[in-house]
C-alpha cells in the first residue's frame, strides 16, 4: 500500500500533507502512514523509578521536537522532581519505550546544606547543572538553609556559605566554632535586655570569667580591652570584655 505523506506529516482533510505539529506543545508524531498519533502516555510511578518525589501537578507533561516528528522518540517528557536532600530539578527526557524518565536534569533549587553550581541559562527560573555540598559549618553544627548559588555572570563560584547553627548543647563562639555549653544548669549570662553571653563547659580564652554553680565551675570567654554592649571588667589592672 502506498502512502501519500512521508514521515513527519499526515494527510489532511483536503488531501494535502500537513506538518505533524503546529507548535512544540502540539504533541503528536506522524510515522509516514498518513496518520497522526498522540505522544504516548503512561501510568508510570515516577517516584519509584527515580527515588525522588514527582512535583509535576499533572504528572506527565510533554513537548515535541521537531515539529515534523516522525517517531514517538521525538516526544519529550517535562517532569519536575525533588530529591530526598531537597534539591529540585527539571528532567526533560525523550520517550524511551516505557516512560519519560532520564537522569539528565537542570537544577533550580538546592536543599539545606547545598548550593547551586554550574550556571546554565535563565528563563522563568535560573537553571544550574548541579548542586554542591557546603563544607563551611564547624564541628557540632548543622545547616539551616541553602547557600548562595554560583553567580550567573561568573563573578563568583563556590561561595560555600550555607547558614548554620550550633547543635543543641553547644554555643557559637566569636571564632565561629561550636563549643560545649555549661551542663550545670546555666548556659547564658544575660546582661541588660539584649546581651546574652554563652557560658561554656571549659574556658576558651585566657583569662576567662569563671562562674560557680554548686560544685561546678563554668566559663565565659574574655578579650582584651573595653567594648560597648557587653560586660567589661578589670583583672589585675587590665581591662577585658566578655565575648561569645
Image (tube, helix red, strand yellow):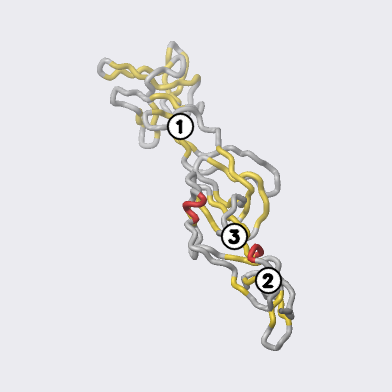
In the image, residue 143 lies at what x, y percent? 48, 38
Q: CA distance from mark 3 to mark 1?
A: 47 Å
Tell which of 55 and 97 is nearer to you: 97
Nearer the camera: disc 3 or disc 1: 3
- Marks 2 and 1 sit apart, C-alpha to C-alpha, by 59 Å
- Please say if the residues under marks 2 and 1 sit with CB atoms less than 8 Å apart: no
Quarter of the image holding residue 26? bottom right
First along the sequence among labels 3 and 1:
3
Badge 3: residue crowd in 10 Å (few <14, some 14–19, many ≥20): few
Drawn side of residue 77 relative to residue 138, left or right: right
Residue 128 x/y as whole percent: 63, 49
Question: 174 and 228: which one is in front?
Answer: 174
Q: Is residue 48 above or below residue 133?
A: below
Relative placement, left or right, of 12 versus 77 is right
Q: Residues within 10 Å of mark 1 (few under 14, many from 20)?
A: some
Classify residue 169 as left or right of residue 3: left
Helix, strand or loop status at disc 1: strand
In the picture as drawn, the residue positioned furthest to the bottom comes out as 14
Residue at coordinates 46% horizontally, 41% vertically from top-left?
A: 144
Q: How far apart are labels 2 and 3 at the CA level?
A: 15 Å
Q: Is residue 225 above or below residue 119?
A: above
Count of numbered labels shown in the rendering: 3
| Front in this rendered view, residue 84 or 244 | 84
Which of the marked residues, 2 or 1, is nearer the chain's N terminus? 2
Query: Which residue is labeled 2 in the image?
Result: 31
- In this view, the residue farthest toward the top is 236
Q: Answer yes or no: do the residues labelled 2 and 3 have beta carbons within 8 Å?
A: no
Q: Are marks 3 and 1 in contact (CB under 8 Å)?
A: no
The residue that label 3 is drawn on is 97
- Position of the N terminus by quadrant: bottom right
Q: Which residue is mark 1?
A: 141
Dot 3 falls on a residue whose secondary structure is loop
Amino acid at each position: 500500500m502506498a502512502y501519500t505523506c512521508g514521515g513527519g506529516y499526515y494527510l489532511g482533510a483536503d488531501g494535502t500533507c500537513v506538518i505533524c505539529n503546529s507548535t512544540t506543545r502540539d504533541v503528536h508524531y506522524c510515522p509516514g502512514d498518513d496518520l497522526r498519533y498522540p505522544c504516548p502516555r503512561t501510568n508510570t510511578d515516577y517516584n519509584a523509578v527515580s527515588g525522588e518525589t514527582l512535583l509535576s501537578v499533572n504528572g506527565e507533561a510533554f513537548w515535541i521536537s521537531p515539529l515534523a516528528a516522525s517517531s514517538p522518540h521525538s516526544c519529550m517528557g517535562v517532569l519536575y522532581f525533588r530529591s530526598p536532600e531537597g534539591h529540585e530539578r527539571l528532567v526533560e527526557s525523550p520517550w524511551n519505550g516505557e516512560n519519560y524518565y532520564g537522569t539528565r536534569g537542570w537544577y533550580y533549587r538546592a536543599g539545606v546544606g547545598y548550593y547551586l553550581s554550574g550556571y546554565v541559562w535563565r528563563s522563568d527560573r535560573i537553571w544550574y547543572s548541579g548542586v554542591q555540598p557546603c563544607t563551611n559549618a564547624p564541628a557540632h553544627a548543622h545547616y539551616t538553609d541553602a547557600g548562595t548559588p554560583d553567580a550567573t555572570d561568573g563573578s563568583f563560584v563556590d561561595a560555600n556559605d550555607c547558614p548554620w547553627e550550633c547543635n543543641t548543647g553547644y554555643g557559637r563562639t566569636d571564632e565561629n566554632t561550636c563549643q560545649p555549653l555549661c551542663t550545670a544548669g546555666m548556659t547564658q549570662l544575660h546582661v541588660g535586655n539584649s546581651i546574652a553571653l554563652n557560658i561554656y563547659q571549659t574556658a576558651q580564652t585566657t583569662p576567662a570569667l569563671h562562674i560557680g554553680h554548686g560544685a561546678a565551675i563554668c566559663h565565659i570567654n574574655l578579650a582584651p580591652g573595653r567594648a560597648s554592649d557587653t560586660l567589661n571588667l578589670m583583672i589585675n589592672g587590665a581591662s577585658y570584655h566578655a565575648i561569645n
